[in-house]
């Protein structure tokens, strides 16, 4: 019989436990549900949610009751040391992500699912990566789209050469906040470009001089535009047009996700005049990105293989965001990666 993995939730707030309530009546709720980490562990056949933690005791009690969780703690360290979970979710505010991941990795947790943003600086990301790699932790990043069948089908067509050599990936994601919103957008640029290394970044973040305290940006600024040059030659763009849609373009055609992943348009170059014509997109399953991210950790624990949003990929994704902010600080200058200023910090004071 397959092993059931013991899971624990650290952070009993919105993404950790209650966001399902916000989208349940949305016409496109099929895109997300089950959405929260707690709901995802309950839905996953291979995991059992055995404990939750939050500094606010009332939240702990509420989430224990909601999901029938046997153990509750106000200190995540005590949870890990007492319960010895196989997998944890880190769904707190961004500030403590790094210390929680390091502690968990150093204290025997084998799988970690960490919400975005990954952290506030590349100094923190480096420490998280070192801890996970030191202990062989199976890590996934909370950018759920990369685990969803629609985007995975897009990536499969790209990898199969259906578009030819990819020229560009474009994210139509509005002027979203760097850490709270565009961490999703940056990760999808990375995923659809093949998850390869980044050569350099240029961008415009809507910062104010008053929000800088040395290398610490105390706001989460909107990103008005960004260019990401991948080492494999793909051009990546974030533009202010909205819709949370992603377009991938090559000499043989284009793919574009529509309405935040509700559907996909595939246009292929055909005929003697090389006209772009609509062709049917392959059928794909509807499935929660949260549940599939958990299932991906389970599969990696079973096999010893790698996860789709591993700590290396997560660090690269986070570095894109921080490099856009650094480029803007330098007046739109080209910022080569790896980012030289590992202490650049983008974090609101309430994080």
Image (spheres, rainbow, N blue to C red):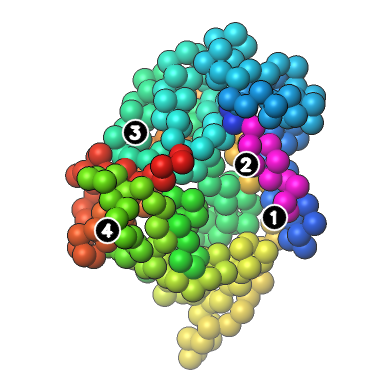
For the residues labelled 1 and 2, the Cα–Cα distance comes to 15 Å
At x 39%, y 62%, the residue is 223
Eye-nearest disc, 3 or 1: 3
Q: Is residue 245 magenta?
A: no
At x 75%, y 35%, the residue is 43
Where does label 4 land, which residue? 209
Q: Residues within 10 Å of mark 2 (few under 14, many from 20)?
A: some
Q: Earlier in the sequence, mark 3 or mark 4?
A: 3
Where does label 1 land, which residue? 31
Residue 98 visible in image: yes
For the residues labelled 4 and 1, the Cα–Cα distance comes to 39 Å
Q: Can you say whether 346 is above or below 236 in the image? A: above
Q: Quadrant of residue 39?
A: top right
- SS at badge 2: helix
For the residues labelled 2 and 3, the Cα–Cα distance comes to 22 Å
Where does label 3 land, which residue? 124
Q: Residues within 10 Å of mark 1 (few under 14, many from 20)?
A: many
Where does label 2 land, which residue? 15
Q: Can you say whether 66 is above or below 106 in the image? A: below
Start-end of magenta stretch: 12-23
Q: Are marks 3 and 1 in contact (CB under 8 Å)?
A: no
For the residues labelled 3 and 1, the Cα–Cα distance comes to 32 Å
Type of secondary structure dominating the magenta stretch = helix
Side of 323 relative to 92 (left or right):
left
């Amino acid at each position: 019989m397959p092993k059931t993995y013991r899971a624990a939730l650290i952070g009993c707030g919105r993404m950790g436990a209650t966001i399902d309530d916000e989208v349940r009546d949305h016409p496109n709720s099929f895109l997300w549900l089950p959405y929260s980490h707690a709901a995802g562990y309950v839905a996953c056949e291979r995991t059992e949610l055995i404990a939750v933690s939050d500094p606010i005791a009332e939240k702990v009690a509420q989430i224990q009751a909601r999901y029938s969780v046997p153990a509750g703690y106000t200190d995540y360290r005590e949870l890990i040391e007492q319960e010895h979970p196989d997998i944890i979710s880190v769904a707190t505010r961004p500030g403590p992500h790094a210390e929680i991941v390091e502690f968990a990795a150093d204290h025997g947790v084998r799988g970690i699912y960490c919400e975005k943003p990954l952290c506030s600086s590349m100094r923190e990301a480096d420490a998280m990566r070192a801890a996970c790699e030191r202990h062989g932790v199976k890590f996934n990043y909370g950018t759920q789209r990369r685990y969803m069948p629609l985007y995975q089908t897009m990536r499969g067509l790209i990898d199969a050469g259906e578009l030819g050599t990819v020229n560009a990936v474009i994210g139509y994601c509005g002027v979203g906040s760097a850490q709270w919103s565009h961490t999703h957008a940056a990760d999808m640029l990375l995923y659809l470009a093949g998850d390869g290394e980044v050569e350099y970044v240029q961008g415009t973040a809507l910062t104010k001089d008053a929000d800088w305290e040395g290398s610490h940006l105390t706001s989460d600024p909107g990103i008005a535009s960004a260019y990401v040059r991948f080492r494999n030659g793909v051009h990546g763009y974030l533009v202010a047009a909205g819709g949370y849609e992603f377009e991938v373009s090559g000499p043989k055609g284009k793919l574009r996700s529509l309405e935040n992943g509700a559907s996909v348009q595939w246009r292929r170059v055909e005929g003697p005049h090389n006209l772009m014509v609509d062709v049917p997109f392959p059928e794909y399953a509807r499935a929660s990105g949260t549940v599939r991210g958990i299932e991906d950790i389970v599969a990696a624990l079973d096999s010893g293989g790698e996860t789709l949003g591993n700590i290396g990929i997560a660090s690269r994704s986070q570095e894109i965001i921080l490099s856009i902010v650094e480029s803007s600080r330098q007046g739109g200058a080209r910022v080569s990666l790896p980012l030289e200023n590992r202490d650049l910090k983008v974090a609101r004071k309430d994080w």
